[in-house]
Image: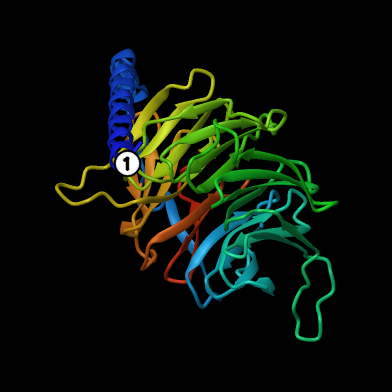
Amino acid sequence: MSVTELKERHLAATETVNNLRERLKQRRRSLLDTDIAGYAASQGRTPVTFGPTDLVCCRTLQGHTGKVYSLDWTSEKNRIVSASQDGRLIVWNALTSQKTHAIKLPCAWVMTCAFSPTGQSVACGGLDSVCSIFNLNSPTDRDGNLAVSRMLSGHKGYVSSCQYVPDEDTHLITGSGDQTCVLWDITTGLRTSVFGGEFQSGHTADVLSISINGSNSRMFVSGSCDATARLWDTRVASRAVRTFHGHEGDVNSVKFFPDGNRFGTGSDDGTCRLFDIRTGHQLQVYHQQHGDNEAAHVTSIAFSISGRLLIAGYTNGACYVWDTLLAKVVLDLGSLQNTHEGRISCLGLSADGSALCTGSWDTNLKIWAFGGYRRVM
């Protein structure tokens, strides 16, 4: 068979696949006769309202000299770890804004960071394809630097995301540019399971984000440059439990809903979406119209403790607070005083839901607290 014939067959196969994909999309739309917002509106539900003092910036954490790429809260809510382009991890006391640790990293190109459940260790990963673990109780060297306590090596691409398994300081899951996710045993430094890769049900492009189910830590979801999210069971690494379609761009962020039965996604297509892990259905799309302008990419998302609010950061500096029930923006933190001056690159809520932390390319982190009469939602 000649090269020309092979190219023609390849083009024909690609066209067939695209046609089938479009037919599947139309079929899904025909089966979903309504969404959450449509049903809630039909029942007379009204959006959450926010006053000028209901969510306010109470602290700015200054110390990084490069873009902030990632952050995470401890489970006891009073500490934050952040990772920056300056090649450092900083551990902050969220109540006083003081730095408790400033860790110089072996590889400056860091992309992700995470606190262990006990708050005794932090993990980070980046372009060196390694996930590094630091014990915060370890002594520092003469220059005040903290040594790496464990290096988890095995990925063949950059480490884009990491998260400790809830209630365990000994296991951690990473997502990587090599299209796989890995469950690690930190004690031994070995891979327990690899999700994707040579398996057909795995991602077909870089994995950008992961989220472990807080209600069932054996389940986690991953988002990828292949425009899909996939649900995994750590007991069955050979295949994804379910694949979720709908986005038309990279899935930059995934986060489980508080009840563990749903999860949210944020994408380069400018939308956030809510999916049900039991049915595989898309329940809602969260999209703000901006006229004819190209939609800003969603970089990071988080749910409030009740799930009624979805907070999403965008590349244009906006940070929308969505009412998940009615799919309406009820507040834009980017329009408030003392807001960031660059894109929102990461965000997260404290364990008790009382405070939000945002990180930005302007090198700062900001802590936003619920105030006034607003109860934690």
Asked which secondary structure carries label 1, the reply is: strand
Give left or right: position of 101 versus 271: right
Give left or right: position of 162 versus 230: right
Give left or right: position of 170 versus 337: right
Q: In the image, is residue 105 above or below residue 206?
A: below
Image quadrant in which you'd find residue 272: top left
Q: In the image, is residue 243 above or below residue 68?
A: above
Label 1 amino acid? Val
Question: Count the marks: how many?
Answer: 1
- Please identify the residue farthest to the left as the structure is shown: 292
- Please identify the residue farthest to the bottom as the structure is shown: 142
Report the residue at 55% width, 75% height from top.
Answer: 86
Mark 1: few/some/many CA within 10 Å (<14, 14-19, 20+): many
Q: In the picture, which quadrant includes the N terminus?
A: top left
Report the residue at 50% width, 66% height from top.
Answer: 68
Question: Horizontal and vertical percent for residue 196?
Answer: 60, 38
Question: Horizontal and vertical percent for residue 283?
Answer: 40, 24
User: Which residue lies under the disc numbered 1?
Assistant: 329
Q: In the image, is residue 330 above or below residue 14?
A: below
341, 6: nearer the viewer: 6
Image quadrant in which you'd find residue 362: bottom left
Q: From this viewpoint, is residue 303 visible?
A: no
